[in-house]
């Protein structure tokens, strides 16, 4: 089953709206017209509207970094799926380890967001991954198994084409430590088997599983060459247009 690479940039809490103009414009001029690899940028909420305008004629897609599970109402400070769709946001990162660690998100609470996203025509990039402690205790596969099973509970089979997973070992995020190509492939192939068991062979084999955690131009080719690595979710290196687009270029060349 051939899966189109997705290279997504998670800008986290970086870039003001005016800084975003420069970064989006540079990314757009470098990779905005190619269609071999899907590219997505996920700026902060405050930059989405402006980014949406700048990407109107571009192949680069827009994503957000979070979303409320609730449709509307008295939820001060929250952003709904409908608000994002209205700005032509296409992807939404959900369950990032920083949301789990600092904002108390759990497999169960993220599951509600994942379901709300697909009900509103947003494509979830559902993040999973173990902490260093869990890896050292040999719990990696058990942890990702419960993240997949609980986070995707009741996920509608007819929406599987819109689902993206991202394996991000927490110990590799922002630390400069990357999983080796083999470590990444081991977990990705395990996750592939889980989704194939859950959704069936056809739909499960089509799901893209991104790798995230200190991916950069120097290690992208090795990671992206693994059979079950279908793209990258890039943090630090996505804040530099040349680095980010060089990762896109690596994916094009594989
Ligand atoms: P870094 O690429 O900075 O390690 O971040 C990865 C990440 O968390 C992407 O969501």
Image: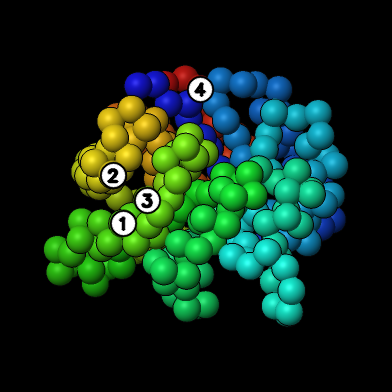
Q: Can residue 84 be seen by looking at this rendering?
A: yes
Query: In whole angstroms, how far apart are the C-alphas of marks 2 and 1?
Result: 8 Å
Any atom of ligand 1 within 8 Å of the CB at mark 4? Answer: no
Whether the residues at callouts 2 and 3 have beta carbons within 8 Å, the answer is no
Give the mark, 3 or 1, whose residue is nearer the N terminus. 1
Is 4 situated above or below 86?
A: above
Q: Nearer the viewer, mark 4 or mark 3?
A: 3
Query: In whole angstroms, how far apart are the C-alphas of marks 2 and 4?
Result: 30 Å
Where does the image place residue 32, in percent across and percent down from the top left? 71, 28
Whether the residues at callouts 4 and 3 have beta carbons within 8 Å, the answer is no
Give the mark, 2 or 4, whose residue is nearer the N terminus. 2
Is 133 situated above or below 239?
A: below
Query: In whole angstroms, how far apart are the C-alphas of marks 2 and 3?
Result: 18 Å
Query: In whole angstroms, how far apart are the C-alphas of marks 3 and 1?
Result: 14 Å
**Label 2 packing within 10 angstroms: few (<14), some (14-19), many (20+):** some
Residue under pointer 1:
149
Is 231 situated above or below 129?
A: above
Q: Which mark is residue 108?
A: none
Give the mark, 2 or 1, whose residue is nearer the N terminus. 1
Give the mark, 1 or 4, whose residue is nearer the N terminus. 1
Q: Nearer the viewer, mark 2 or mark 3?
A: 2
Q: Which mark is residue 198?
A: 2
Where does the image place residue 178, in percent across and percent down from the top left? 34, 51
Whether the residues at callouts 3 and 1 have beta carbons within 8 Å, the answer is no
Quadrant where the C terminus sits is top left
């Amino acid at each position: 089953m051939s899966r189109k690479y997705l290279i997504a940039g998670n800008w986290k809490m970086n870039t003001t709206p005016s800084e975003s103009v420069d970064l989006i414009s540079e990314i757009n001029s470098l990779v905005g017209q190619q269609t071999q690899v899907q590219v997505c940028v996920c700026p902060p909420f405050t930059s989405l509207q402006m980014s949406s305008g700048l990407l109107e004629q571009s192949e680069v897609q827009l994503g957000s970094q979070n979303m409320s599970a609730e449709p509307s109402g008295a939820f001060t400070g929250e952003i709904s799926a409908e608000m994002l769709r209205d700005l032509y946001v296409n992807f939404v990162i959900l369950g990032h380890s920083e949301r789990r660690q600092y904002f108390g998100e759990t497999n169960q609470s993220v599951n509600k967001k994942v379901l709300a996203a697909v009900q509103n025509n947003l494509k979830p990039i559902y993040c999973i991954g173990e902490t260093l402690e869990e890896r050292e205790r040999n719990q990696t596969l058990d942890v990702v198994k419960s993240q997949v099973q609980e986070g995707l509970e009741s996920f509608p089979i007819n929406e599987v084409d819109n689902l993206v997973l991202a394996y991000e070992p927490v110990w590799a995020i922002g630390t400069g430590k990357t999983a080796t190509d083999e470590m990444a492939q081991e977990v990705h192939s395990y996750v592939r088997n889980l989704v194939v068991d859950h959704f069936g062979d056809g739909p499960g084999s089509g799901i893209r599983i991104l790798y995230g955690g200190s991916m950069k131009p120097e290690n992208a080719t090795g990671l992206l060459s693994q059979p079950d690595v279908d793209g990258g979710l890039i943090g630090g290196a996505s804040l530099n247009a040349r680095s980010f687009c060089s990762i896109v270029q690596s994916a094009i060349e594989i």
